[in-house]
């Protein structure tokens, strides 16, 4: 399999962590290659994310490197096992790789934090507001690219639809809230959407706290049966 021309952010991160562990252990590239029984040129390609590596080989390398953090080794092995392509891959080749990296990182994140000064954060944008933002790009976007970016931005919001969505915290400057992109109607819809999303995160937090206090599933069924018997 030829090396990847554009490794993803997760693939680069896996490679960089393996390189860090190797260098901290004082292991040479040649010795690492001998451990895996591969040509020494393969190690730099693995460490740059251009070539994949199996979870078993990740554990072999980490064990030899003397990694003191078993949780990190498990996480790196899990990253190596990732074979399924995310929904964002349908845009590869038509949109900049950096945009797809954002989608991949958001997909795997347990917490998201952002600070913006000139516009509403992408994950909170309505379609009309996003269209207005892309409409003032310099240089102007061709219609196919504009439509692709718009579809990508709307699809990114699905991270909030997961059963356990990531914690999301956004610091938004007053200037961003007062921007009139798209006109008063678009701005009004956008700000109302931000308000609705802020309430939704608050209610989800309340739900999580109540869930922690609730009986487990089996115990809940037993309790309901007890109530039935008491009727």
Image (cartoon, rainbow, N blue to C red):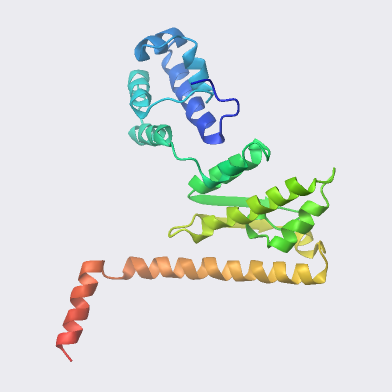
Q: 165 and 88: which one is in front? A: 88
Outermost residue to the left: 229
Query: Residue 22's quadrant in the figure?
Result: top left
Outermost residue to the bottom: 231
Query: Residue 88's quadrant in the figure?
Result: top right
Residue 95, above or below 117: above
Estimate the x, y position of residue 157 in percent, counting from the top left.
58, 57
Residue 28, above or below 125: above
Let me know if residue 216 appears in the view. Answer: no
Residue at the (69%, 61%) spot, across then down:
127
107 left or right of 121? Answer: left
203 left or right of 178? Answer: left
Residue at the (36%, 29%) spot, across then down:
55
129 left or right of 24? Answer: right
Estimate the x, y position of residue 89 in percent, counting from the top left.
56, 41
Residue at the (30%, 70%) spot, across then down:
214
Residue 200, above or below 138: below
Q: 101 and 24: which one is in front? A: 101
Estimate the x, y position of residue 222 in percent, counting from the top left.
18, 75
Residue at the (63%, 56%) spot, across then down:
154
Query: Residue 186's quadrant in the figure?
Result: bottom right
Let me know if residue 127 appears in the view. Answer: yes
Estimate the x, y position of residue 43 in percent, counting from the top left.
47, 16
Q: 89 and 164: which one is in front? A: 89
């Amino acid at each position: 399999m030829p090396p990847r021309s554009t490794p993803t952010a997760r693939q680069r991160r896996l490679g960089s962590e393996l390189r860090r562990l190797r260098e901290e252990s004082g292991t040479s590239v040649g010795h690492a290659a001998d451990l895996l029984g591969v040509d020494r040129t393969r190690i730099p390609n693995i460490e740059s994310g251009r070539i994949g590596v199996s979870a078993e080989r990740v554990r072999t390398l980490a064990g030899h490197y003397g990694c003191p953090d078993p949780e990190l080794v498990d996480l790196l092995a899990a990253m190596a096992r990732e074979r399924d392509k995310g929904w964002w891959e349908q845009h590869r080749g038509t949109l900049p790789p950096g945009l797809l990296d954002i989608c991949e990182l958001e997909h795997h994140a347990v917490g998201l934090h952002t600070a913006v000064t000139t516009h509403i954060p992408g994950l909170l944008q309505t379609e009309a507001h996003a269209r207005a933002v892309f409409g003032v790009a310099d240089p102007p976007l061709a219609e196919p690219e504009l439509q692709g970016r718009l579809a990508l931005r709307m699809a990114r919001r699905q991270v909030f639809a997961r059963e356990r969505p990531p914690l999301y915290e956004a610091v938004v400057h007053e200037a961003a809230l007062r921007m009139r992109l798209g006109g008063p109607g678009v701005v009004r819809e956008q700000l109302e959407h931000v308000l609705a999303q802020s309430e939704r995160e608050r209610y989800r937090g309340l739900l999580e706290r109540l869930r922690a206090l609730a009986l487990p599933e089996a115990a809940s069924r037993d309790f309901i049966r007890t109530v039935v018997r008491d009727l």
